[in-house]
Amino acid sequence: MSQFISTSALLFLVLLSACKTDVSKPITTESNAPTIDSATGQPIRLPNPWKSAACDLITDQEFFAALNIEEKRDFANKRSLPNDGYCMRTWKKPDWREREVIQDKNPNIATNPESVMVIQVIDFGTQAVASAQFDMHKRDRINGYATDVPDLGEGALWSDSQSMILVKKGHLFLQIKLEHADKPSDNLPKAKELAMIALQKM
C-alpha cells in the first residue's frame, strides 16, 4: 500500500513539473508577434485607413471651431489628393484686404493674405520602420525638426523653418503644416491642438 502511495505521489510530481510554466521565457502571443508574409519572409505592411481620407482627420466643423473660421466670410477652401494621404485647406486672414493692398503697392513685401493648413499622413508600413525614421528626423533635424513637442502621440517634433509639426502614431506619421500666424513659432500651439484632434481618430 505504501509503495502504491509513493508511486502515485511521484507520478503527480512529474505531471506537475511538466505542466509548470517557465516564467523566465517571454510568452509570445499572436498580438505582439510580427506578421510575416510566408511567401517573401518580409513583414506585412499594416493598413493605412487615411490614404484617401486625410481630410476626415479634422472635419470642417472641428477646423472652423479651432481657428475661428466662417466658411463664406473667410473664403475657406479644401482640396485633397486621392490615395496620397493629403489634405490642404486655405482661408483668408481677417485683414486680407489690407494685406493685398500693401502687396500690390510693394510686391517685394510678402504680407501673406491667405492662411494655409496641410495635413499629410505618411505610411511607413511597419512600426519598426516608422520608429527608425522618427529617430533619424530627430537626430539629423531633417526639415528643421529641432523642437520636441511633449505629450503628443508616440513622439512629436516641430520645425520653425517649415512651420510644421510631425507626430508618430504606430506605423504612420501625422504631419501638419500651419501658416496662419506671421511668426512661424506662433503657429505651434494651434498646430498641436489640430494634431490632438486628428490623433483621437487614428
Image (cartoon, rainbow, N blue to C red):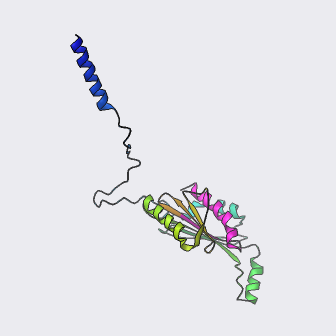
State the residue at coordinates (49%, 69%): 84
Q: Quadrant of the rendered structure where residue 73 is? A: bottom right
Name which residue lies at 38% across and 38% down. 23
Rendered residue at 70%/83% (across/down): 110
Residue 102, x across and y down, in percent: 76, 85
Residue 146 drawn in magenta: no
Q: Please provide the residue range marked out in magenta.
A: 174-202
Residue 191 in which image quadrant: bottom right
The location of residue 137, given as percent across then percent down, is 52, 68
Does residue 43 appear to the left or right of 4 in the view shown? right
Query: Do we see residue 159 in this rendering?
Result: yes
Eyeballing the image, is 27 above or below 76?
above
Is residue 53 in view from this perspective? no
Q: Give 23 or 129, whichever is nearer the viewer.
A: 23
Q: Residue at x 38, y 50 (%)?
A: 33
Q: Is residue 10 left or right of residue 187?
A: left
Q: Quadrant of the N terminus?
A: top left
Residue 51, percent from left and from top: 48, 64
